[in-house]
Image (tube, rainbow, N blue to C red):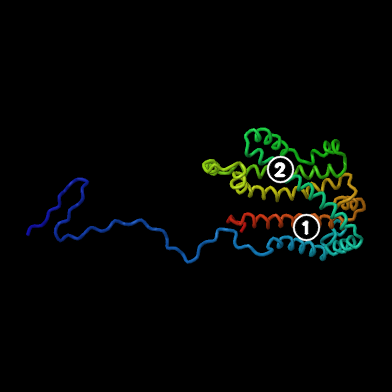
Amino acid sequence: MTDLLPTARTGGPAVLTKGAAPPAAPPQEPGPPAARGTRRRLGPGRSLPFGRLIGPVLLIAAWWAASASGYLDPRILSGPGSVISTASDLVATGRLQDNVLISLQRAGLGLFFGVVSGVVLAVAAGLSRSGEYLIDGPLQIKRAIPSLAMLPLLILWLGIGEEMKVTVIALGVAVSMYINTFAFLTSIDSRYVELAEGLDLSRAQFIRKVVVPGSLPGFFVGLRLGVTSSWVGLIVVEQINATSGIGYMMFQAQQYAQSDVIIVGLVAYGIFGFASDAAVRAIERRALSWRRTLAG
C-alpha cells in the first residue's frame, strides 16, 4: 500500500504520512502557582477588647517612669503621684466636681445646638439646589475662619456670659456636622433617587429610606469631630473672663505656678474627650451594623 503523501499548502495544516509520529505539542504558558495553604492577611487584623486603652496606658507608664527616675523636673511637670494627690484634695473640697459639672453643661449645650443646626443646614443644602446655593457658600467661608477668630466679634455682640461661650462651641460643632453630613448626602448614588421616583415615594419616605441611610456614616464622622470641637472650644472660652469651669481652674493655677492643678484639668479634658468619642463609636457600630469595614 502506498503511503499517504502530505498535501503541501502554504500556511495550511500539515498532513502526516502513514506511520509518522505526531508532532510535539506546543509549549504551554506557565500557569498561576498553586494555591498555598494560608492566605496573606492584608487587613489590620482582629480587634482586641479595650485595645484603644493600650496607647494611653503606655503614655502614663512612660510619664510615671520618667518622674520616678528623676528625669522629669517636678517644677516643669508634676509626676503622676502628685497629680493624683492634688485631684483627691480637689475632690474632697468639692472644687473639682463643681467646675466639671459647669464645663459639662457648657459643652453639652454647645454640642446639642451645633449638631441640630449643622444637620438641618446639611439637609436643606443637600436636597435643594437653591438651598445649596444659599447655604453652602457661607458655610465654606466659615469653615476657613476659625471660631476662635470670631471671639472679639461675639464678645461685642453677646458679652462675656454663657451665651457667648455656648455660641463659640456650637459654631465649631455646626461646621463639622454640616461638612461631613452634606458630603455624604450629596454622594448618594443618583440611581437610588431614580428608583425612589419610580416607586413614587413621598418626600418623607425618600428622606427616611434613602437620605438617612446614605448620609448616616457622614453624620457619625461629623459627630465625632463635633465632640472634639466642643472640648477644644470649651478649653478656650473657659479661660476668657470665666468665673467657673475646668478652664477657669487651670487659669487660676497658672497664676500660682500650680502645675499639678493644671495637669488635673488636662487629664479631666482628656478623659471626657476619650469617653465621649468612645461612646459615639459604640453608637455608630450599632447604628451601622450592616457595614463591613476595616474598623471591625
Circle nearer the N terminus (1, 2): 2
Amino acid at circle 2: Gly
Quarter of the image for the C terminus: give it: bottom right
In the picture of the structure, the residue carrying the numbered disc 1 is 271
Rendering coords of residue 253 (x, y %)? 90, 53
In the figure, 127 relative to 227: above or below? above
Rendering coords of residue 61 (x, y %)? 76, 64
Q: Secondary structure at mark 1?
A: helix
* Total residue callouts: 2
Rendering coords of residue 153 (x, y %)? 83, 36
Quarter of the image for the N terminus: give it: bottom left
Relative to 249, 13 lies left or right: left
Residue that appears at 74% across and 55% down = 276
Pick whichever, 107 or 36, lies toward us: 107
Rendering coords of residue 55 (x, y %)? 71, 60
Relative to 240, 140 lies left or right: left
Label pair 1/2, CB-CB below 8 angstroms: no
Q: Which mark is residue 195?
A: none
Q: Secondary structure at mark 2?
A: helix
Pick whichever, 280 or 25, lies toward us: 280
Amino acid at circle 1: Ile
Alpha-carbon neighbours of circle 1 within 10 Å: few (<14), some, or many (≥20)?
Answer: few
Pick whichever, 172 or 199, lies toward us: 199
Q: Residue furthest left?
A: 1
> How far apart are the two marked residues, 1 and 2, measured between alpha carbons?
26 Å
Residue that appears at 72% across and 55% down = 277
In the picture of the structure, the residue carrying the numbered disc 2 is 118
Eye-nearest disc, 1 or 2 = 2
